[in-house]
Amino acid sequence: VMKKILSLVFLGLTTLVLSAAESKKPLRALLVTGGCCHSFETQKLILSEGISARANVEWTIVHEGDDREHRVSIYEKADWAKGYDVVVHNECFGFVDDVAFVERIAAPHKAGLPAVMLHCSSHSYRKAQTDEWRKVVGITSMSHEKRRDMLVKSNGTSHPVMIGFPAEWANPQDELYKNEKIWPGAIPLARAWGEETQKEHAVIWVNTNGKGRTFSTTLGHTDATMSNPVFLDLVARGLLWACGQLDDNGKPKPGYGPGGK
């Protein structure tokens, strides 16, 4: 009788655990995209569909502007980030120089809102005389080398974001963003050699700033890079890590895999 009771209790607990995993709501992600120099119309689909195939994420997409000076309208509101679990920045607005505007974008991330920074986001708002955005990104970068085939080398870390990433990855036709400063909260995870600068630059890293976590990569200039499974796997892990939903083995925590698995 006691064995039967214990079995029923075990089954009940197992059901509760499974139900809890199944009932996890998708992460509410805001993708902000637009600006100059990239095919954001295509990339917003590559990113949203590719990440959702790897993690339990639902999307709101704000795509505005086709030049460096555009001010994304959602950022005009003080509570622009309200209701989101993570913001994916894939934007290229380098000439926006309004300090108050830029600091309003950075503030929710410093307060704890997870961020994913892709490619030209590292160069966005570089004209603004404030470091608040750069502190969220984790590096200061003001320019990049010419577009070319790039060999990306893992730093050999056991960080869960890099589990599954190859020791070396041949990334065709991308841009190497120059690291002018790596902020104290940043942990470089992979690097590439600068042919023009004759030194290595971090191209993948994680960052903490205030209470917020950021996953960043300067890779992703072309649609070919963005749509590569190596890149999408990496960004999905980075997003989950920033949200605290990636386990130590580089896998989504229960309920945060594709389809809520």
Image (cartoon, helix red, strand yellow):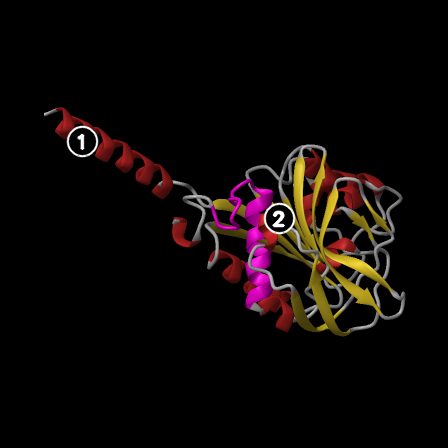
The x, y position of residue 169, in whole percent, is 65, 68
> Please, is residue 224 above or below residue 233 in the view?
below
Q: Which amino acid is tagged 2?
A: His
Residue under label 2: 159
User: In this orientation, does residue 175 appear?
Assistant: yes
Q: Which mark is residue 150?
A: none
Label 2 crowd (10 A; few <14 / some 14-19 / many >=20) = some
Nearer to us in this view, 42 or 138? 138
Q: Quadrant of residue 15?
A: top left
Magenta region includes residue 9 = no
> Please, is residue 111 above or below residue 168 in the view?
above
Residue under label 1: 8
Magenta region includes residue 237 = yes
> Please, is residue 145 above or below residue 33 in the view?
below
Secondary structure type for disc 1: helix
The x, y position of residue 82, in whole percent, is 59, 37
Give, as a single range, the part of the protein colored magenta: 229-252
Secondary structure type for disc 2: loop
Q: Is residue 32 left or right of residue 100?
A: left
Nearer to us in this view, 44 or 151? 151
> Please, is residue 234 above or below residue 183 in the view?
below
Nearer to us in this view, 223 or 225? 225
User: In this orientation, does residue 47 appear?
Assistant: no
Q: Which amino acid is tagged 1?
A: Leu
Q: What residue appears at the point 48 percent right and 52 percent down from the top-left corner?
A: 55
Label 1 crowd (10 A; few <14 / some 14-19 / many >=20) = few
Q: Furthest-left residue in view?
A: 1
